[in-house]
Amino acid sequence: MKNNQFMEYRIQVLKALEEYKDVRKKANIDDVGLSASVERKASPFVKGHFTLAVVGKMSAGKSTFINAFLGNKNILPTGHFQTTCVLTKIEYAEDESIEIIYGDGHKECIKGDISGKLGKLVAIEDKYSSLPVNDINKLIVKGWSKAKICNPKIIKGMEETSCRAIDKKVLEQYIDSHPKSKVAKEVTIQYPLQEDCKGWRIVDTPGVEAVGGIDIETINFLTAKGKNGGNNVDAIIFLHKGTDNIEDKSINDFVKNIFKTLSDDAKKRIFFVVTNAADETFQNNEEEYMRKAKALFVDPYGIKNDRLIAVDSLMEILYRYVTTEHKDVVSLLKSKTAPDSSWNEQVWRICRSLLRDIEDTLEDADKNVNNENLTAMIQDWSSFAKLRTVLNEFVKTEKTNAYYDFLKTVSEDIKICVDHRKNDIALLQKGTEEMQGQIQALNAAEWEKNLTLGSIRKNFDKNTIKERFAFIDQRIDSKIMDSSASFKDIRREAINLYDLTDEKKATLFAEMASEFNKYVQVGTSKVFFKRPDFEEIEKEATEDSRYKEDVKNTRKVPGMCCDDYEEYTEHAKGDVDEDKKLRLFRTETVRHIRQEANKFKEDIQKEVDTYVSQVNVSLQQAIDDQMSHLSELMEKYKVSSDDQLNAMITQANNEVAVMKQFLNSISKY
């Protein structure tokens, strides 16, 4: 990523922050002012990441895509079947390391050369490649016994979700060899990535089964908010294999299931990326394929057209290899074996086959088959440059407001300091009479303070806060309580409700920040609207909906001369009453949301009241501090000679000049 927009912002923020601290020191500014707010607004750039999550079906090529994006073909293990079934985060660091959190909570950290080690730790063995390992691991971590997991009904459910036949003996072997302590839940990789990936966090989400949706842990990760109030995940790449039939029903169902699960806010951050774009099958039908992809997966979900992109991961890996290692592509084209030990022979054979396709393309166009033309076409076929450009534009859109808000706060703090210093200069020039006048004005400021406080209390009182969040009950009644809503509808609408609540909360605190920041620094709200554990609620609803005994019924049996009737088992003992299950699921979900909503609104009010109280304290403190400062300045004036007074005025003017020079420079950022 030649234009790494996030790192450009990080560099600018670090520079502005350093200059800001330096000018406060040079100008002898000893009050804290807005410095805490400045530090808080700089934190997402200085300590945070731009997080990109990759979502896709099993064998969609997620690991290869991520390796290509990061410019290192060996960071994540790759393979035809399942490779990893855990949330895997890759971040930039000077030193290599892998940290694994297991199902029983213990951590393992590997430092030093990590090449190839992750695959040995978390990759799925070939003999278990037929199993839906994601689902099985979740049950193991939950503490389910082997007997419970191997229950025929559980196995049948996993078979329906994954579209795979499950061998019970293989399943039992997997469970025996994978206790909680060996089931990885989360992996964090730190690696000295190339410069264009600094500041980014790439997340490989667990591969999704054939027709199943994203699991609840991944949904929570994709839709959660970070500590600073921003999105936990900034952008989401939905990966689709370009050699798969774009109109295949299972693929369409798979995509629909995922989009039904994601919140509206998450959908705004989705990119639809088609892989294997250099494959001959895809290239022969590229225009028609992308047209169908747009009609099926982009237009219906409101994804912007420029976020539908076709790339080839192997071409990008090859391009990075030949440019960073300064390889001659003509020689590689002629080579029948992998160029070095870093290449897997099978992967290299595919790359060499693609190189031959490029050679044919150049010859058909009457172009020289030389290193320059081959390298240029490798890059063109990879299309990662286009993807990075679109992503960087998205970063710019997402982070620009936060960046300029940081600069605005820096400027506001220094401007306040300039005004204070100018007032000191005027007082030193006019003498004690002017100082005494300001002291008397401060004595009358108590009345003004009460007026200000009264206005603030009116704008953020209990009734106002109640009105702001009245939509919660309204949406519960109109969306979640809808009798036609399915399980997925209820989950989606609940997540949308939480996202909307987060937005309203952010708006409330932004308004408080705007009105309160003169007196107190308003941070991110620490109150959270607790989300329901949908899986647990559904599990309980399932158990409570099982028939306690066989339900018998009769049905007509046509006969030769007259009809007869027979008794049959309409519902066997242990079967699930799906209608009842849905009703119970809806009822319990609504009960949880209402209960947590009431607590949320109470806690928000307490938090708002705390800030209002802090404003009161701050207003009084400002009066007391200014009174103390004026008294101190008056005493200095009384005992100073004309030369000393002139020196004090000169110093104050110099400090104002330093601050103004900084303000001028910050305006050019």
Image (cartoon, grey):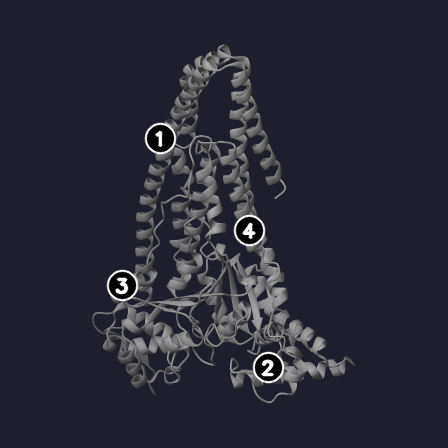
CA separation, marks 1 and 4? 37 Å
Label 4 secondary element:
helix
Q: Earlier in the sequence, mark 1 or mark 3?
A: 3
Percent across and percent down for residue 539 are 29, 65
How would you rate the neighbour count of disc 4 (Cα within 10 Å): few for under 14, some for 14-19, many for 20 or more? some
Label 3 secondary element:
helix
Percent across and percent down for residue 215 are 39, 66
Q: Earlier in the sequence, mark 3 or mark 2?
A: 2
Q: Earlier in the sequence, mark 1 or mark 2?
A: 2
Residue that carries the numbered disc 4 in the rendered image: 11
Residue that carries the numbered disc 3 in the rendered image: 540
- Please identify, in this view, whether the residue under mark 4 or under mark 3 is nearer the observer: 4
Percent across and percent down for residue 376 are 69, 73
Identified by mark 3, the residue type is Glu
Label 2 secondary element:
helix
CA separation, marks 1 and 2? 66 Å
Viewport quadrant of the N terminus: bottom right
- Please identify, in this view, whether the residue under mark 1 or under mark 4 is nearer the observer: 4
Q: Earlier in the sequence, mark 4 or mark 3?
A: 4
Place residue 466 in its image quadrant: top left
Residue at image point 54% right, 28% down: 418
Identified by mark 2, the residue type is Cys
- Toward the top, the furthest residue is 433
Residue 613: mark? 1
Residue that carries the numbered disc 2 in the rendered image: 351
- Please identify, in this view, whether the residue under mark 3 or under mark 2 is nearer the observer: 2
CA separation, marks 3 and 2? 51 Å
- Toward the left, the furthest residue is 549
Residue at image point 30% right, 56% down: 588
